[in-house]
Image (cartoon, rainbow, N blue to C red):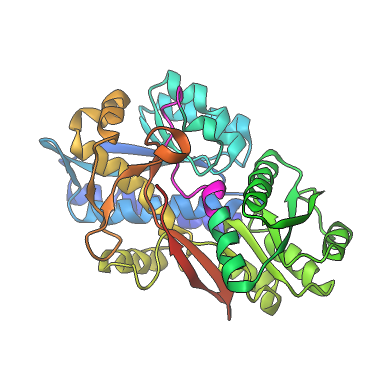
Amino acid sequence: MHKRTFLKFSALAAATVLSLPLMAHAENATLKVGFVGVTSGPAAAWGISNQRSMEARATWLNELGGVKIGDKTYNIEIVPFDDQKDPKRAIAGMEKMAQDGVHYVVGPNVDDGAAAVRPAAEQNGIMYFPYSFPKALFSPPASNAILSMVANYQSGPAIYKYLMENKGVKKVAFVAANESDPLSQRESGVAAAQALGLDVVSSNVTYQVDTTDFTPVLLPVIQSAPDLLVLSGVSPANAPQLIRSARELGYTGLISTETAQDAAVLKEGAGELAEGFISVGGASTPELASDTMKEFVDRYTKMFGEYNDESNTKVYALEYIIETIKANPAAIDNVDEFKKTIDTFEAPNPFMKGDAKLKYVGMTSFGQKRQISVPLVVNEYKDGKFETLFVGQVD
């Protein structure tokens, strides 16, 4: 979506969040929750789904009368900041949150930004919920970041193992943009593939993010004849271009990625050539979705005119923030109190059927609970939309 259109929608959403609910419940206090992430450029789809998910859920909660925390009721106000996928702007965004009295921030969406804001978050008493994978952010002595999705080093092995067992994959090749995030994800993917016994036939080909002709990039990779081509850390804007180029070069094998994608972008950019493309999806499927999740999707769609499957995951961060503070009201302006609550926190999961719980995980990957528990949903692109390939879970 064009940036101007998104800003129009965001302004409308913000007006809805700030005006209507507050008019109806003017006596309520305000809990500000920030978003610092990318909502413009090639990776914009990641941050747009973040911000829209937060705005849609906040509007809904405010319409219901607000959120009861301790002996007070709060309206939720979303404070957004577009970091443009620039670490320096991400730092500026986090410092702005501190100036605005915000203690809880969702984002950033990429590794560089999430790492860059760590000092500002720790110095200003901010807990942040990034969508980035460096283990150092979530492992001791770090303690202010909570991983808000399934990491590539958690999803990659699950995807490769599934494809080995169900699709006969034996040889794999990796392609990555020449940036720290994709290169790091490629490194983790190669290690996981080798540990599973796959033959890694190509893992040193990179491209610049502004590449428009991927034929010379992919030609040597295709010539290595992999059964599976992994697009490590690929952005939603580059994915359809790479898929199209690979297919036009005659590649007939499987293509996958450990990053979430946008079905509408794939349809527009690659069309039928994207059939069978495998990616990590949102943390819900029709079989898992509760009535609350279904209503969230409906509200989001009406609010913004479209829906992104990735928001099935992005809806969770705000919910975890609110429910954890509800469990310990002293955490509303004190992140040390929030941290005390993490290890024992548990609450009903409103977005899944049955008795699923909101809880923190990550002991296996980080040695401490610094990850929200969301299902690992792996999708396959078919007929213009995503279909669930399989569902897993992270410890």
- Identify the residue at image location x=32%, y=50%: 17
Q: Nearer the viewer, residue 159 or 385?
A: 159
Residue at (33% x, 37% y) in the render? 32
Q: How many marks?
A: 0
Residue closest to the eye, 230 or 114: 230
Q: Is residue 89 visible?
A: yes
Displayed quadrant of residue 370 = top left
Q: Is residue 242 left or right of residue 374?
A: right
Quadrant hosting residue 31: top left
Residue 196 among those drawn in magenta: no
Against 287, residue 260 (above or below) is above
Residue extending furthest top? 123
Front residue of 253 and 109: 253
Q: How far across and down, in percent of the image, does residue 54 sit?
A: 38, 50
Q: Position of residue 345 (x, y in %)?
A: 24, 40
Residue at screen point 67% across, 67% down: 169
- Side of 157 where 105 appears, left or right: left
Query: Is residue 229 depicted above or below 114 in this figure?
Result: below
* Residue 148 in the figure: left or right of residue 275: left
Residue 261 in sight here: no
Q: Which residues are magenta?
A: 140-156
x%, y% of residue 112?
A: 61, 35
> Residue 290, relative to residue 330: is it above or below?
below
Q: Residue at coordinates 85% horizontally, 57% vertically from top-left?
A: 217
